[in-house]
Image (tube, grey):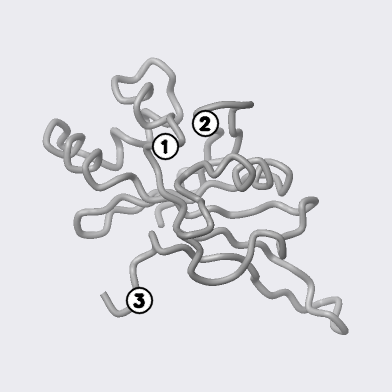
């Protein structure tokens, strides 16, 4: 993913806004993905409100409860395909239009792409210490049905 670190605020259907840092954006075939880092507590709210299509039926690997609410969580989100196609049909640079919409409130697409339900959560990962080796780190997290298979 291209590095584009910038603060973002996404609006869930209800509750507090979701604040995070945009870490990257990537186009892949007919899909657009972003990586956003949020606090562990913010991610717990994402789980509680089923934001980004995160419902039990969508979980493919892992459990949100295994993540530490005190540590940051890196979320990989996919823009819904219909919305991706709609924006791409009107913009020469899809990733630029979406990044600007996420980060700049007065951009044309900001009211659309800042809605949490414009996105699907593909994965949520967290760096954790390996028990017994304080210098070693591993990633743990969840993967949802919205994440394409590695074979694609």
* Residue at disc 3, secondary structure: loop
**On screen, residue 58 above or below 36:** below
Measured Cα–Cα span from mark 2 to mark 1: 7 Å
Q: Nearer the viewer, residue 3 or 152?
A: 152
The image's mark for residue 77 is none
* Residue labelled with disc 3: 150
Q: Residue at x 50, y 63 (%)?
A: 59
Q: Which quadrant: the N terminus?
A: bottom left
Say few, some or many: other residues with alpha carbon within 10 Å of mark 3 (under 14 / 14 to 19 / 20 or more): few
| First in sequence: mark 3 vs mark 2 | 2
Q: Residue at x 65, y 46 (%)?
A: 43
* Residue labelled with disc 1: 117
Front: mark 3 or 2: 2
**On screen, residue 64 above or below 23:** below
The quadrant holding residue 42 is top right
Return the x and y of residue 14 as percentages of the image width and height.
56, 26
Measured Cα–Cα span from mark 3 to mark 2: 29 Å
The quadrant holding residue 15 is top right
The image's mark for residue 12 is 2
- Are circles 2 and 1 on residues that touch, CB within 8 Å? yes
């Amino acid at each position: 993913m291209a590095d584009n670190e910038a603060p973002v605020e996404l609006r869930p259907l209800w509750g507090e806004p979701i604040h995070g840092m945009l870490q990257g954006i990537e186009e892949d075939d007919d899909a657009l993905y972003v990586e956003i880092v949020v606090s562990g507590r913010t991610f717990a709210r994402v789980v509680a409100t089923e934001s980004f299509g995160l419902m039990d039926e969508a979980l493919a690997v892992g459990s949100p409860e295994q993540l530490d609410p005190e540590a940051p969580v890196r979320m990989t989100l996919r823009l819904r395909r219909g919305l991706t196609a709609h924006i791409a049909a009107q913009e020469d640079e899809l990733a630029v239009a979406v990044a600007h919409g996420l980060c700049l409130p007065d951009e044309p697409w900001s009211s659309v792409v800042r809605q949490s339900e414009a996105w699907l959560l593909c994965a949520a990962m967290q760096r954790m210490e390996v028990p017994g080796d304080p210098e070693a780190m591993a990633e743990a997290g969840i993967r949802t049905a919205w994440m394409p298979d590695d074979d694609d």
